[in-house]
Image (cartoon, grey):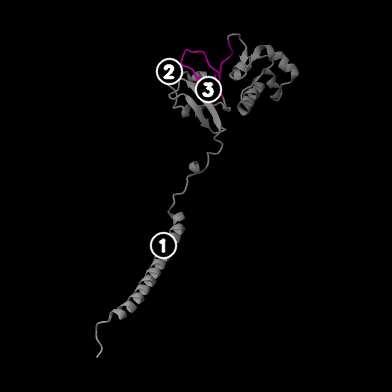
Amino acid sequence: MVSSEASPGEVSRVRPHRLRLSIGAAVVLGLVVLSTAVGLGIMRGQAAPSESVPLTASAASPAPGGDLYVHVLGAVERPGLYVLDLDARLVDAVAAAGGTTDDADLTAVNLARVLTDGEQIVVPVVGARAEPGAPSTGSADDRIDLNTADQSALETLPRIGPALAERIIAWREENGRFQSVDDLLAVPGIGEKLLEAIREGARV
């Protein structure tokens, strides 16, 4: 009759076998866990693009043409430096600065004027001297400012009629401020002789 109790020698033979089984099971379990973790990681990586929030056009890249810098001062709500589109006009700069104050003299500025990069805009108060950008008829020395004069003021220059006055304003709006009186030569219809005739009565 075989005894149900194992002898000490038999026990020593059984324990190593059970130990080997435990180690093998642990290894298999570890591989299963590792495989599961890797699988979850791959699934998460594939799912990430669908969960991401797409960038808006403004966040992904700067606004097209938004590289015209102007400095707005005077009778506006928020004076400061503003970045506008290249085709912006003076009214856009004033709007960016929060609009004008109650004492602003809007008759002294041309809100429809095309802006140039790097210019300073000063909106004067009522009763103040008009600053650059205003449709002034001239200055203290009675010369016509080519950069601020309106059509009627330009027509007071020698041999400048309505057509040439309109061309001067159109050139100014398309190309920016005149840097010198000689820049009038770039205006269609104005040559050397006409320039000499109006040189003494014009300034920039």
Horizontal relation, residue 15 to residue 71: left or right: left
Outermost residue on the bottom side: it is 1
- Name the residue that disc number 2 marks: 103
Q: Is residue 132 within the magenta segment? A: yes
Numbered badge on residue 121: 3
What segment carries the magenta color? 119-139
Q: Assess whether mark 3 and mark 2 are in contact (beta carbons under 8 angstroms).
A: no
Label 2 or label 3, whichever lies nearer to me, is 3
Separation (CA) of disc 2 from disc 3: 16 Å
Disc 2 residue type (three-letter):
Asp
Label 2 or label 1, whichever lies nearer to me, is 1
> Of the residues under marks 2 and 3, which one precedes in the sequence?
2
User: Mark 1 Cα within 10 Å, few/some/many (few <14, many 20+)?
Assistant: few
Disc 1 residue type (three-letter):
Ala
On the image, which quarter does residue 165 sit in? Answer: top right
Separation (CA) of disc 3 from disc 1: 63 Å
Q: Report x, y in % for residue 150.
A: 58, 19
Label 3 or label 1, whichever lies nearer to me, is 1
Using the rendered image of the protein, determine whether residue 61 is visible from the camera's viewpoint. yes
Q: Report x, y in % for residue 81.
A: 50, 27
